[in-house]
Structure formats: C-alpha cells, structure tokens
Image (cartoon, rainbow, N blue to C red):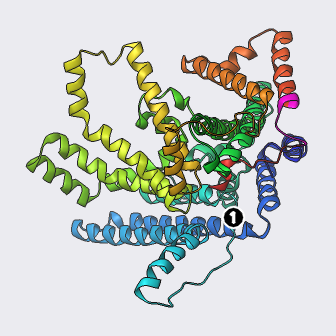
C-alpha cells in the first residue's frame, strides 16, 4: 500500500483517524495496532509471520534479561564482595548470551532473506575454482516489507534493555505496536523504543493544531513525491536504462536529476508519514535536516537519513570504538606514532564497520559495498588530513567562517554526494565506471528524448527551485508550518489549495506514467 495511493490517503487513513477518535482514550492504541497489521498484511500477505517472529523473540528475550537482572538484585546485598562480583559476571554473561541469540535470530533472518543470493553467488563463483561441481542451491526468497527497518528497531530495543537504558516491556501489544506502526514500517524512520512506544500506545485527544500541521506535511510530502520525484523517475530510468547511448552533459544531468529524485522521494515520503503520525498526536522522528547545505561529508550524513546514522553510531561505532582491541590500537599509535594518529586510527577502525554496514544495508551487491567504501575513504581524508587542512588555512590565510568559503565547501560536498548517487543508481560497478568516464566526453543523445518534454523539465526546474527556497528558509531556523498557521485564514487556505491543485494538475500519474514505489522501501 503506497503512501501516495488513493486507498491509503482517502480510505485507510480516513477510516483509521475516525475510528481512533471514536473509541475510548485508553483503547485507541488498539486501532493503531489493528490498522498497522492490516497495512502490513495488505502489502506483504503471509510474510507477516516474519514480523511476528521478530516481535515475539525480542519480547521474550527482553523479559529473560530482566529476570536475570532481578534474580541478581534480589540476592546482591546478602552476598560477600567477591561472591557478588562472581554472580554479577555470571548474570552479565547470561544476558550477553540472550542478546546474542536475539541478534542471531533477527539479523540472521534479515541476512538470509536479503543476502542469500548475493553470498551464494559469490561462494559458488569461488567454489567453482577450488572444487569443480560445488554449488549452493538457488532458492526462491521473498523479502518482507520493511524488514531492514523493523529489524534495526528490534535489535536496538534488546540492546537498550541489556544496557539498562530501557526497561523490558511487559505489555506485548505496546511492543508489537512499536515494531509494526504503519507510519514507520515501509521505509522508516528507524525509531527508538523510548521515543515512540509510549506516545504511540497512549491515547491522544483530537488537536486542531496537530491536524493542521499533519495536513501541511502530507501535502508537502505529496508534492515532493508526485510532482518532482515521480516525474524525475522518467528521465532517470531512460538514461540509466541505456547508459551506453548517452555521454557528456546528459549523463551529468541524469546524475543531478537522480539526486533530486531520491531526495524528493524519500524526504517526501517521510513528510507524509510524519504528517500521518501527527493526525494521531504522534511525533515521528525527523529523518532529514536540509542535507544539501552540508559543508562536509560527515555533516551530510548527520543530516541525511538521520535515524539510520544515529543507529549505526550507537550500536556499531561506539561499541567498536570502546572495545579493548581498538583502545589498545589507540594507545599504541599515540605512543609510537603521534597524538593525532592515536586519536584517528581507532576512529578509522570503527568507521570501517559503520560504512561497510551502511553499504550492505542498502543492498546485496558489491555496488553497495563500494558505495559504503566511497564514503569511508572520503571520511578518512577528512580524519587523517586534519593537520594538513589546518596548515593549509594557516598558510593561505583563508577564514573558514567566511561566507564565500562556506559556500565553496557546500558546492564541493554537493558534487561529491552526487558522484556517490551515480554509484548508488548505476546498475553495476562497471556501468558506474563507464558512466563516470563518459561525463567527460562530448555529449551524445537527444536532450528532448529523455522521457520528459519541455513542460516536464520546466516543472522539475521550478519544483527544485521551490524546494531550495524552502530549505533556505528552514536553514535559517524559521518554522514554515507555524508561519503559515499564523496567517489569516483566507491566505492560509489559498496556499493549501494552491499546493493541492499543483499536486492534482502537475503530479506524475495517470496515462503515460507508471506507478513509482517509494525508493527506500526496496532497501
């Protein structure tokens, strides 16, 4: 069920909102739970069983860890110091075993369903050289909707319980709602238990302000998705579908238009789901914060897909950084090399696993591994090059804070990100290399035979300009929704009607347009 479909917007969302506010306050969570499972069943059918396996396993695992902790706490004061340390060590080891089992079950399911074909193909290719006739069987596997998203939420929950940051939830329905909430299940955001579970479970009263803000977000999200992203998809699919037919400026245009497509698609869908959540009084986590105003690659990833980056930071980067092996590496480097390398090398070691995970999370192919490594190498340049960069500023006298220099950094980062998007969209590493090389050759191909006519290109250009203007306003700390809500009613509703008419008249749907599923739902 697409977030831009008539069924979702007019039937599903409308009926769910009506039911939610008709039943008693304390029972309203049942409407969300029932609606979320109906939403998931409509999209995935029998594969809903995998969502249930994840929910039941982490529910039981968290309770098992709580029992271990309670058993230790009940006798702790009566134990001698040495015996207390021994019992605590035993308790922590049992909790680690439980966490390991939960991660093995859930990440194992994700890895098997999403990556079996990738790993089996590579193992078979290697095995054919080492042992002729060796072949892993080909399996017909389907990937459940949103498994990459709800698995990370589930793993984050059990790790938080293990760390003592979150109490194990005894209410199965609350945990089930947290993992299945229809606003998050398709393409995130990846919410934390303490941020989402409580507010989704507790009943909310109807609030005109929340309704208004929710409707604004939905309208703006539909504009980005249907007017810009789905229209851009035509040009992108034309060029990337036959990359050998184009070179020069057309490939560069396709690269920039794909960046516009994926941003308008993903950010637009996030605005729709955040707006949908607001209709029920639920604040869904932000996933974007004007990423194309970033001055470095690190800043870009703190602003793009923010919840995924935060998850990697908390559950991969910090544990690896604080591991005994990595801390020994830092002390050795500081002693034998330099203070700077003593700080940089442990960070670089931890970041390798972050970017490897980032690449593989997006897809099961070497292209996505290379995508992660691309950003890893760029990050290493910034990490290890700090002394050189500092020396450069001292020698040239350039003021880092000056507006022209800051704008140059934004342009530099934007270009690097677009090259990464080219790699992300190309059908293979070989095709990426060919397309990248072809950008520097003479332009071939017809500009007006790329799937879009002059009117479509004008709509794309004006829509991108509007998104840029909105981003500039937001970057200055101005909340557009609040500004619009404070305007006189006639002006306010004129804006709403204008955006609605733009979606109806300019949206890429109907004859000549194929349905474009949300891009990140495929990851």
Q: Is residue 177 magenta?
A: no
Horizontal relation, residue 514 to residue 119: left or right: right
The question of residue 509 being in magenta is answered with: yes
Mark 1 nearby-residue class (10 Å; few <14, some 14–19, many ≥20)? many
- Compared with 455, 35 (above or below) is below
Q: Determine the residue positioned at 76% across, 26% down.
A: 459
Q: Which residue is more in the foreground, 388 or 496?
A: 388
Kindly identify the residue that appears in the image at 46 percent across and 37 percent down: 416
> Where, by quadrant of the figure, is residue 339 drawn?
top left
Give whichever of 170, 73 is nearer the camera.
170
Q: Residue 141 occupies which quadrant of the picture?
A: bottom right
Could you tell me which quadrant the C terminus lies in?
bottom right
Whole-percent x, y for residue 353 in the image? 39, 56
Q: Is residue 64 visible?
A: no
Residue under the image location 42 percent in, 36 percent down = 297
Q: Is residue 199 above or below residue 523?
A: above
User: Image quarter for residue 288?
Assistant: top right
Majority secondary structure in the magenta region: loop
Q: Is residue 38 left or right of residue 315?
A: right
Of 465 and 114, which appears nearest the observer?
465
Magenta range is 504-511
Q: Residue 504, image x and y in percent?
A: 88, 31
Task: Reply above or below: 165 against 100.
Answer: above
Q: Which residue is mark 1?
A: 144
Q: At which x and y percent is residue 48?
A: 74, 66
């Amino acid at each position: 069920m697409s977030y831009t479909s008539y069924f979702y917007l007019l039937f599903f969302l409308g009926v769910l909102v009506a039911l939610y506010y008709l039943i008693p306050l304390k029972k309203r969570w049942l409407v969300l739970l029932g609606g979320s499972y109906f939403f998931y069943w409509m999209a995935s059918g029998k594969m809903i069983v995998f969502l249930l396996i994840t929910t039941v396993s982490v529910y039981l695992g968290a309770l098992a860890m709580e029992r271990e902790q309670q058993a230790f706490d009940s006798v702790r004061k009566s134990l001698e110091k040495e015996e207390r340390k021994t019992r605590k060590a035993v308790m922590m080891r049992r909790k680690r075993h439980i966490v390991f089992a939960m991660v093995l079950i859930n990440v194992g399911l994700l890895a098997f369903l999403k990556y079996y074909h990738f790993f089996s193909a590579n193992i078979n290719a290697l095995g054919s050289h080492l042992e002729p006739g060796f072949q892993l069987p080909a399996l017909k596997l389907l990937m459940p909707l949103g498994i990459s998203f709800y698995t990370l939420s589930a793993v984050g929950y059990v790790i938080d319980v293990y760390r003592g940051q979150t109490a194990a939830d005894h209410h199965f329905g609350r945990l089930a709602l947290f993992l299945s909430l229809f606003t998050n299940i398709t393409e995130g955001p990846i919410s934390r238990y303490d941020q989402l579970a409580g507010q989704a479970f507790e009943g909310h009263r109807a609030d005109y302000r929340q309704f208004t803000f929710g409707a604004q977000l939905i309208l703006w999200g539909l504009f980005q998705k249907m007017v810009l992203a789905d229209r851009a998809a035509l040009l992108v699919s034309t060029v990337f579908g036959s990359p050998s037919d184009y070179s020069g400026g057309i490939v560069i245009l396709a690269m920039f238009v794909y960046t516009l497509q994926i941003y308008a698609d993903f950010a637009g869908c996030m605005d729709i789901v955040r707006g949908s959540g607001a209709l029920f009084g639920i604040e869904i986590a932000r996933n974007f914060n004007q990423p194309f105003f970033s001055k470095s690659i690190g800043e870009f990833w703190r602003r793009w897909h923010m919840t995924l980056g935060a998850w990697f930071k908390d559950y991969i980067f910090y544990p690896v950084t604080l591991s005994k092996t990595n801390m020994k590496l830092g002390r050795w480097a500081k002693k034998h090399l330099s203070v700077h390398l003593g700080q940089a090398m442990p960070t670089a070691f931890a970041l390798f696993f972050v970017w490897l995970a980032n690449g593989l999370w997006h897809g099961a192919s070497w292209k996505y591994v290379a995508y992660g490594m691309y950003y890893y190498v760029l990050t290493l340049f910034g990490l290890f090059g700090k002394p050189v960069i500092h020396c450069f500023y001292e020698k040239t006298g350039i003021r880092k804070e000056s507006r022209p220099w800051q704008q140059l950094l934004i342009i530099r980062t934007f270009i690097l990100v677009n090259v990464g998007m080219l790699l992300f969209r190309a059908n293979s590493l070989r095709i990426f290399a060919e397309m990248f090389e072809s950008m520097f050759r003479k332009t071939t191909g017809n500009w007006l035979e790329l799937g879009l006519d002059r009117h479509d290109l004008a709509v794309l250009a004006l829509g991108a300009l509007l998104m840029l203007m909105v981003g500039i306003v937001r970057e200055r700390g101005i909340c557009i929704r609040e500004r619009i809500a404070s305007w006189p009613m006639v002006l306010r509703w004129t804006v709403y009607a204008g955006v609605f008419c733009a979606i109806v008249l300019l949206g890429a749907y109907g004859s000549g347009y194929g349905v474009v599923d949300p891009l990140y739902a495929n990851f």
